[in-house]
Image: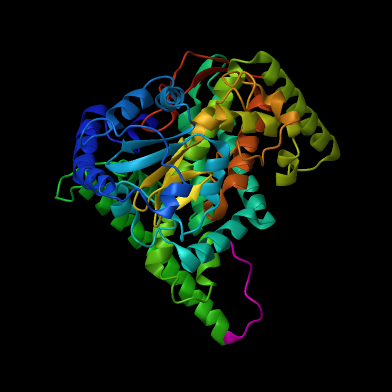
């Protein structure tokens, strides 16, 4: 299952995507920039970063993609950083003149900027599938409103308690099934993490309990997600067309849930039965926002967008953590000791584990933080300048993209000692709020689910290490088109009971 889900097409099709996407915009950008006047006051004050546009039409995209498929995708940036003597350089990627930054301060400045300077930029197929009302694409007050409402709900103790109970309830039969398989049973962690996390997040987003409808939704979602980076052709039978049809089917289901919730809310309001119940899911939060802008279509589109971490980011975080722990026995031992102490203490007190218990596990949090730094599940983000912008002395002209490349920052040996070594202990002294650590983005578009991602990973790790010992089989990290384990991270389990 996980190997069939990708945000980019297969390699052969990808070259076609690159060429088609690049050709249309590249020539116009090159010609328009070459004709700009060089004697303006702004250009006297700010210098265009060094670099090269590469080949005509395709720019440096092919080299970027080639490096991305290697074991060290950051080689594309590192090579140019050395060549040009700057962590900020110009290039031409995916059809647009682009300023690439692996400078932590410049990256932070771009992330902190608002729509008066930069707006999100995504490939055309992705924008087609997400829709104009997606939280990834909207700007201004509407973006802040949606992000604020969803972010506050995701941070709420109520949702964290619900997610904790759901994860514990869902993990129990999975652990029992693994025990019944007997010693040495092989489990592919990535597959199980995806299945469990998707069910839990869907309930938190739209209130749908595990069952046939959830399975149908997941099937449609998998059909939808493979088209996010496909050829931008909507003819019947194409990848993009099939993904759009899958989204329509998901939207119908979610909008029927929204309409039923609105109907019940209207009945409660007209009956004057006291204050409404606290929101149980993200739809409840948005429909209570009392805004005509928060239409059924906008809400359903954003619920679909917010399912992406359940299929991709969080399960991969869990899987990468288990791979890293399997290769670092000292870290695994300390993580096991910390979690066993918590389990024994709660058992002796006759108490159930709460979300605060999981988040209080300091070394477990260090493991998750280090996994995020090394794993770089999100390699970077792209923004487009809506005006000429100067950042730390570098000019980013209007219409150009800026590629904030997290991976090179997280693996910079000037910022992290031995950056390719898994070292959770480094976070005992290092602050995760530093500008050099941005696995969830930043600014107004900071991922609203960052706390939930940590919580879900903590719960999964706790129950695994307190229930089983394991030996990992050989597997390899694939970094492109999405970060994942090639074989799904198979491990051979032995129960501790």
Which residue appears at 48% of the width and 56% of the height? 208
- The spot of residue 347 in percent (x, y) is 80, 35
Is 161 rendered above or below residue 196? Answer: below
**In the rendered image, the vertical position of residue 168 relative to residue 185, given as above or below:** below
Location of residue 79 by image quarter: top left
Q: Quadrant of residue 342?
A: top right
* Residue 335 in picture, x, y percent from top left: 71, 25
Q: Can the viewer see residue 10 in this picture? A: yes
The residue range painted magenta reads 271-281
Q: In the rendered picture of this protein, how many numbered marks are placed on residues? A: 0
The structure's colour scheme is rainbow
Q: Residue at x 62, y 75 (%)?
A: 276
Tell me which corner region of the image, top left, top right, bottom left or bottom right, holds residue 433. Answer: top right
Q: Is residue 279 magenta?
A: yes
Residue placed most toward the observer, 283 or 305: 305
Q: Left or right of 249: which side holds 165?
A: right
In front: 416, or 225?
416
Magenta stretch, overall SS: loop
Q: Nearer the viewer, residue 164 or 453?
A: 453
The vertical placement of 147 against 23, above or below, is below
Is residue 497 magenta-colored? no
In the displayed structure, does residue 61 sit left or right of residue 429? left
Q: Quadrant of the N terminus?
A: top left
Q: Residue furthest front?
A: 39
Give the farthest residue toward the right.
349
Residue 158 rendering spot, x and y as whole percentages: 67, 57
Horizontally, residue 139 falls left or right of residue 450, namely left
| Quadrant in the picture for the C terminus | top right
> Horizontal and vertical percent for residue 344?
80, 30
């Amino acid at each position: 299952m996980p190997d069939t889900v990708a945000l980019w097409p297969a390699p052969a099709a990808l070259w076609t995507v690159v060429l088609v996407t690049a050709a249309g915009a590249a020539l116009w950008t090159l010609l328009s920039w070459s004709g700009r006047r060089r004697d303006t006051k702004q250009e006297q004050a700010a210098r265009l970063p060094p670099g090269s546009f590469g080949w005509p039409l395709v720019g440096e995209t092919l080299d970027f993609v080639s490096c991305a498929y290697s074991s060290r995708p950051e080689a594309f940036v590192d090579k140019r950083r050395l060549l040009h003597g700057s962590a900020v350089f110009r290039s031409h990627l995916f059809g647009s003149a682009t300023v690439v930054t692996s400078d932590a301060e410049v990256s932070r400045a771009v992330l902190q900027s608002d729509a008066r300077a930069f707006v999100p930029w995504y490939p055309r197929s992705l924008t087609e599938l997400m829709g104009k009302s997606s939280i990834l694409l909207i700007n201004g007050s509407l973006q802040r409103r949606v992000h604020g409402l969803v972010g506050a709900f995701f941070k709420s103790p109520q949702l964290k308690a619900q997610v904790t109970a759901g994860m514990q309830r869902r993990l129990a039969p999975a652990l029992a099934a693994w025990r019944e398989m007997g010693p040495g049973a092989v489990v592919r962690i990535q597959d199980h993490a995806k299945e469990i996390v998707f069910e839990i997040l869907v309930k938190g987003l739209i209130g749908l309990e595990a069952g046939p409808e959830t399975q149908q939704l997941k099937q449609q979602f998998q059909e939808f997600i493979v088209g996010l980076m496909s050829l931008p052709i909507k003819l019947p039978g194409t990848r993009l067309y099939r993904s759009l049809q899958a989204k329509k089917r998901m939207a119908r289901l979610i909008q029927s849930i929204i309409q039923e919730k609105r109907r019940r809310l209207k009945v409660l309001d007209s009956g004057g039965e006291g204050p409404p119940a606290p929101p149980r899911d993200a739809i409840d939060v948005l429909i209570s926002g009392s805004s005509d802008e928060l239409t059924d279509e906008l809400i359903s589109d954003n619920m679909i967008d917010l399912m992406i971490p359940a299929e991709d980011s969080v399960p991969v975080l869990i899987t990468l953590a288990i791979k890293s722990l399997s290769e670092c026995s000292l870290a695994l031992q300390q993580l096991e000791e910390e979690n066993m102490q918590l389990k024994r203490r709660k058992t002796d007190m006759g108490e159930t584990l709460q979300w605060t218990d999981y988040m209080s596990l300091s070394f477990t949090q260090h493991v998750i933080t280090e996994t995020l730094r090394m794993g770089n599940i999100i390699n970077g983000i792209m923004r487009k300048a809506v005006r000429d912008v100067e950042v730390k002395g570098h000019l980013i002209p209007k219409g150009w993209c800026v590629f904030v490349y997290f991976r090179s920052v997280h693996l910079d040996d000037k910022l992290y000692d031995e950056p390719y070594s898994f070292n959770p202990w480094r976070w005992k002294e290092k602050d995760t709020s530093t500008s050099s650590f941005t696995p969830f983005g930043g600014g107004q578009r900071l991922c609203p689910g960052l706390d939930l991602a940590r919580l879900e990973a903590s719960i999964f790790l706790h129950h695994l290490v307190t229930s089983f010992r394991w030996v990992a089989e050989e597997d390899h990290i694939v970094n492109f088109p999405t970060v994942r384990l090639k074989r799904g991270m198979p491990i051979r389990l032995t129960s501790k009971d």
